[in-house]
Amino acid sequence: MSLKKQRLFWTALFLLMILASFIIPFTPLLSDLTSLYGAFLFWSVFAIIIIICLGLITAKWRNFDER
Amino acid sequence: MSASTIYLTLFLYFIVGTIIARYARRKMGTGVNDFFLAGRTLGGIVAALTYSATTYSAFMLIGLAGFTYIGGVGALGFELIYLSGLVLVAFFGPRFWLAGKRYNYLTPTELLGDRYRSRAVSTVTSIASILFLIPYSAVQLTGIGALLEGISGGTVPFMAGVFIAALIAVYWTWTGGLRAVAWTDSLQGAMMLIVATASVFFVVYRGFGGFGTMFAQLETEYPAWLTVPGPGFFNINAFVGLTLPWFFFSLSNPQVSQRLFMPRSLGQMRIMVMGFLIFGFIYTLVSIFWGFSARLLLPNLETADSATPALLSLDLIPSAISLLVMLGISAAAISTINSIILTLSSMITRDVVKNLGRKVDDKKELMVGRIFVPLFTAVILVFATLRLDLIAALSVASSAGLLVMVPALFGAFFWKRGTAAAVLVSCIFGGSAATIFQYTGYYPLGLWPGVWSALISTTLFIGVSLVTKPPLEKAEEFIGYLQEELNTNKIL
């Protein structure tokens, strides 16, 4: 994938994920689920996915040091 | 907890930090870059710990635990969405770092001024940062004063706590500049995390028998606390109003964005970012567990902010650990204040005094910068003692107010059409709106000040840019250079 496409891909993915993190817990899907496996699990998994994505993106930062 | 125990603990803590700060001073070179940016040579782990300790203040174990106590799991969403704001660093981090090295920027506001070819831009954005961050720091000091007063049953007076915290922050900063701040932050950050995590295990296992039982009890006794809007505190407007400004914290707050200039390489910046994310994730969960535990064990507290101090006074945690948690919360506040003092000193020196027009060499600039370290501390101290309503309002408005710099930063790196006039108008009107709405409590259409400051500043930045003349030559050179470097190295 070209760098331009990668930038678009990650921007779109992050926008989607962040919008979802605001909206989904307030929808009946989760707002009625009075359990650990509701909003608590949703936001924890959301944060872990973000951390993994950032790990993938920043892996390339090491290229700069090896030049 | 007796006053003498608290004073002795703080004294020992001060001595350990002072040894570190003095050692840092021996490593310090001469010049402004060395004092304020540690010569752009920070290693990844120290950078991660100072980034974490600067970002996370006393708010976490006091305020966030309190939010959980009254509002439930929405507090977790608020704080984790804020943590996810680091996705912005994926794009802005390498750009800040590269531009900082090439143009020798000392402050994020200097970057804005140079990119938009306007001294007024760097001066106005610096003054706005100072106006919002001084009250924010003052509230940190009052937090320590209140915590020590509460935990000692009033035998440590409020003012004593405030003065001791200010003294510690200013002495370490003055002694060794950013290197001392970063190294003492590392100690403080590690302590904050370890002690808070250990103590939450004591609370949960001794109080409930384990995490499973705690959640089972929550599901039975306080089911609404596991949902949003849940008990009502986190209705959608409040949730967005609180969370939106904090999502942009990594860009809007100069004491944090200045740290993007500091790692010695991009590889080290990666360690900084990933280290911070892991730190933040654990520290957030710990703060939330404090809040849930207090909800179940102490259901009748008068104020939510007293959840953590009240838990500490129960018999669940050994007194030595309680003492360390008190120290950890104080460390969280001090490590935020000292970084802010240093950043504000660098901004007023580089973006205000130097812009007045007189020629200032490196040595003189450093001298002026160092003088502002105790001066800012004194101002913060005075604000902390005043306990005015406006200070509290400005502190709360700080995240919404500082948000107005974000459109200008997006423009600096990604939009050649952005202009200096647009930055000035968007920052002045957006910042004023945030302050007025926060102070008066008037929320038009039910939207919070942070949402309004984002809407106003973005609209004005785009609108005014389209009708004024951009510094195209600088924009082409600045963005062109970054694009070339990033593309060569296949970085986003």
Image (spheres, helix red, strand yellow):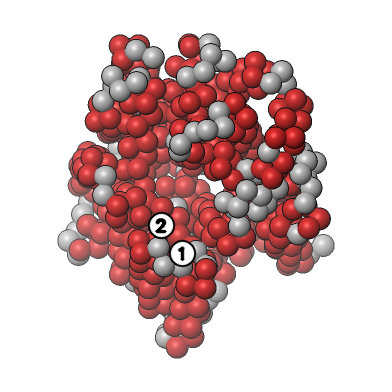
In which quadrant of the rendered view does residue B385 lie? top left
Q: B477 or B258: nearer the eye?
A: B258
How many other residues sit within 10 Å of disc 1, few (<14), some (14-19) or many (≥20)?
A: many
| Sooner in the amino-acid sequence: mark 1 or mark 2 | 2
In the rendered structure, the answer to whether residue B374 lies left or right of residue B393 reads left
Residue that appears at 22% across and 57% down? B353
The answer to whether residue B75 is seen in the rendering is no
In which quadrant of the rendered view does residue B272 lie? top right
Q: Chain of mark 2?
A: B
Mark 1 lies on residue: B449
Residue B403 pos. (x, y %): 47, 61
Image quadrant occupied by the C terminus of chain B: bottom right
Mark 2 lies on residue: B397
SS assignment at label 2: helix
In which quadrant of the rendered view does residue A29 lie? bottom right
Residue B113 pos. (x, y %): 37, 66
Residue type at mark 2?
Ala
The answer to whether residue B195 is seen in the rendering is yes
Q: Chain of mark 1?
A: B
Q: B58 or B228: nearer the eye?
A: B228
Q: B473 or B12: nearer the eye?
A: B12
Position of B430 relative to B86 (above/below): below
In the rendered structure, the answer to whether residue B390 lies left or right of residue B216 reads left
Residue B225 pos. (x, y %): 66, 42
Residue type at mark 1?
Pro
In the rendered structure, the answer to whether residue B296 lies left or right of residue B133 reads right
Position of B459 relative to B185 (above/below): below
Label 2 near label 1: C-beta < 8 Å? yes
Q: A51 or A33: nearer the eye?
A: A33
SS assignment at label 1: helix
Residue B324 pos. (x, y %): 47, 18
How many other residues sit within 10 Å of disc 2, few (<14), some (14-19) or many (≥20)?
A: many
